[in-house]
Amino acid sequence: MRFDNVLWEKIGNKILDPICPIHRMKMDQWIIEGQEKDENLLKCPDCEDMLELPRTWDDEVEYIERKLNSKDYKHLKILNLDDEQIPVAEDEVPSPKDSKYFVVARLMKSKVGLRLVVYAGEKGAKKKTQIFVEPQIKRLAFDQKDMHPSEVFTMLEATFEDGSKQSIQKPKAQKTK
């Protein structure tokens, strides 16, 4: 990868060495005789000229790491729940194939910002429920043209930040004689 006219070798998440863009050789930090090495000058063994970084060595490496991370963060979708930015790993999470039911969650853009839509129901049936979460306007709703969520879900479980869980379950209908 190229930053500030220097190629940089990267292994995993670690920036290792500057590489000369012309000769493709590892560059060294320039050392002037009798002085400590200069923090922002690089020299290729085959080049006559020195290359000057716009920042000190440590600041340049940190800058490159931030730029690389920004490319990763740019692809994440973020939900703002109560002023906490929560990255969403996937746009769509399908339910297991061997289940009689399906649950699909999709994150999409709407006029009011990001919207999480959860679709659920019995596979093959035309009826389903849709739940909408719109964190930017603090709204939770369901599509009234479809089934009410209580007709599809019998239990809801929430996992909290501290790892504790709480669930609510719909009471089972009593059989009549």
Image (cartoon, helix red, strand yellow):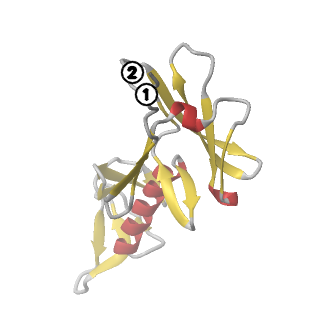
Q: Residues within 10 Å of mark 1 (few under 14, many from 20)?
A: some
- The label number, if any, that marks residue 95 in the structure image: 1
Callouts 2 and 1 close, C-beta under 8 Å: yes
Q: Residue at x 57, y 15 (%)?
A: 125
Q: Is residue 159 above or below residue 104?
A: below
Q: Extreme right residue here?
A: 111
Q: Residue at x 46, y 36 (%)?
A: 154
Is residue 5 something that shows in the picture?
no
How far across and how far down the image is residue 136, in percent?
67, 59
**Quadrant housing residue 100:** top left
User: In the rendered view, does 40 fall on the left or right side of 150?
Assistant: left
Q: Quadrant of the C terminus?
A: top left
Q: Residues within 10 Å of mark 2 (few under 14, many from 20)?
A: few
Q: Amino acid at mark 2?
A: Ser
Q: Extreme top residue here?
A: 124
Q: Residue at x 39, y 61 (%)?
A: 65
Residue located beneath label 2 in the image? 99
Q: Residue at x 65, y 49 (%)?
A: 114
Q: Amino acid at mark 1?
A: Ser
- Front residue of 148 and 6: 148
How far across and how far down the image is residue 175, in percent?
44, 26
Is residue 8 something that shows in the picture?
yes
Q: Extreme left residue here?
A: 34
